[in-house]
Amino acid sequence: MTSYIEPLAQESTPSIIADKLRKAIGHGEFKPGAQIVEADLARKLGVSRGPLREGMQRLTQEGLLVSIRNRGLFVIDMTPADIRDMYLAREAIERAAAFKILRDGDFETVGLALLAIVDQMAAAEGDPAAVGELDIAFHELLVRLADSPRLLRMHQTSIIETRMCIHALEETYLGTDARAIEHQRLANAIRTGDVARTDELLSAHMDDAIERLVNR
Amino acid sequence: MTSYIEPLAQESTPSIIADKLRKAIGHGEFKPGAQIVEADLARKLGVSRGPLREGMQRLTQEGLLVSIRNRGLFVIDMTPADIRDMYLAREAIERAAAFKILRDGDFETVGLALLAIVDQMAAAEGDPAAVGELDIAFHELLVRLADSPRLLRMHQTSIIETRMCIHALEETYLGTDARAIEHQRLANAIRTGDVARTDELLSAHMDDAIERLVNR
DNA sequence: GGGGTTAACATTGTCGACAATCTACCTTTC
DNA sequence: GAAAGGTAGATTGTCGACAATGTTAACCCC
């Protein structure tokens, strides 16, 4: 049981706005390449342009938006090169996360938690959207359980980009059964504390994902 | 020879401000834990609070500043746990960068470029500040030559944190001769395309750095 | 008709002012 | 004398207005 008394961290308005924008971009509400018009969005969110601009600067820093001076901010367009680069970064982060868990975390518990997601994934077979979300949940949990603020923050950005990709492709991004098995193997490697196999599976998993996204 | 005709990217004011702030933090002009007072800083920079706040939001996203609502923004205080976490992230990024160079880059040229920095480092022996800067330049170049926008962006943040640490310690962060040798070995491993040895040396190098910083 | 100029419009960039909030100090009360 | 309450100052949060810039389309000239 956690204590009810804990330091209350009120989020700043810009950070709330940034969160909402990330979700919107990840779920395809803003299409890649689309311009974000400040006045419109500010009205929709019920804030003035100041806090909105502050929030958008965060996404610019993350590389989710690109700024063209006196023109505006645009959602990034994920080229094949971007997809490859994004997976390079994701692999770096997730390998480090997995490694940390195996070295000084409770890898057995982590492995079991990941297997729970795999079970849901198997149950959701046939529903690409649900499997996609569970896929992301798997990787998010992996990094969260590594207990590293920096890896988690960096990973968050990559996850949005991943979501952008699978959302843009929607129906094409299939192979739902194969993916459940891949994740199961990975979770088991972690559960048994097998460093080499975890590394190997993670690399292969990322390569597969690139294949699926780029050569559709 | 690069073409003179290239898309001219005028930086936005917030991004310029963010750059200046990063430099200031990295060089100890803002001490860890210090509050950034908007009005003062805006006056010093010759801009109004709007653009300044936008720039500061970028650093907040990077984790270099922490925001406390209605209180202000503060420079992070690097605890030993933070130092460890930062090196975990840096190792993840640099390993990925090195791996990419070895896999599909011109590792020989990269190795030679890195050795050039090592030479300067050997020449600067006895001047801790110069060696420190060259140390950082080495790692910056490594990631830059990997040609990955995402790794480079994430690395930039870690580098500022590194600079904060070595600056805070100043004179204590020694062992200048040992460091030149460590870097030389690493550059040679890359030059000869030795993946396993590069990985091993990079890990060891990061562990050493943590030792030097935490157990001072 | 093609190229160039101009004007209107839309959008972003910047600023100053005001409101909300917190901190620190002083005062009051028991 | 200690704790509660109140007040003044400082700082952040938010907003609306104006300036600067870029884009589009109409118009004119060759």
Image (spheres, coloured by chain):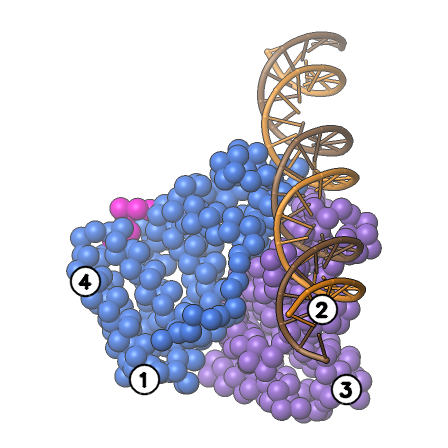
Chain colours: A purple, B blue, C brown, D orange
Of the pair A110 and B24, the residue shown nearer to us:
B24
Name the subunit of mark 1. B
Residue carrying label 3: A171
Name the subunit of mark 3. A
Question: What separation in Å lies between label 1 and label 3 (alpha carbons)?
Answer: 41 Å
Question: What separation in Å lies between label 2 and label 4 (alpha carbons)?
Answer: 51 Å
Sequence-first disc among 2 and 3:
2
Of the pair A130 and A213, the residue shown nearer to us:
A213
Say whether residue B112 is left or right of residue B145: left
Question: What separation in Å lies between label 1 and label 4 (alpha carbons)?
Answer: 23 Å
Residue carrying label 2: A34
The answer to whether tags 1 and 2 share a subunit is: no
Type of amino acid under label 2: Ala
Say whether residue A141 is left or right of residue C30: left
Which label sits in the foreground, 2 or 4? 2
Of the pair D15 and B76, the residue shown nearer to us:
D15
Q: Secondary structure at mark 2?
A: loop
Question: What separation in Å lies between label 4 and label 3 (alpha carbons)?
Answer: 57 Å
Q: Secondary structure at mark 4?
A: helix
Location of residue B130 in the rendering, given as x and y in whole percent from the top left corner? 25, 53
**Which stretch did the figure color magenta?**
B169-174
Residue carrying label 1: B193
Question: What separation in Å lies between label 2 and label 3 (alpha carbons)?
Answer: 22 Å
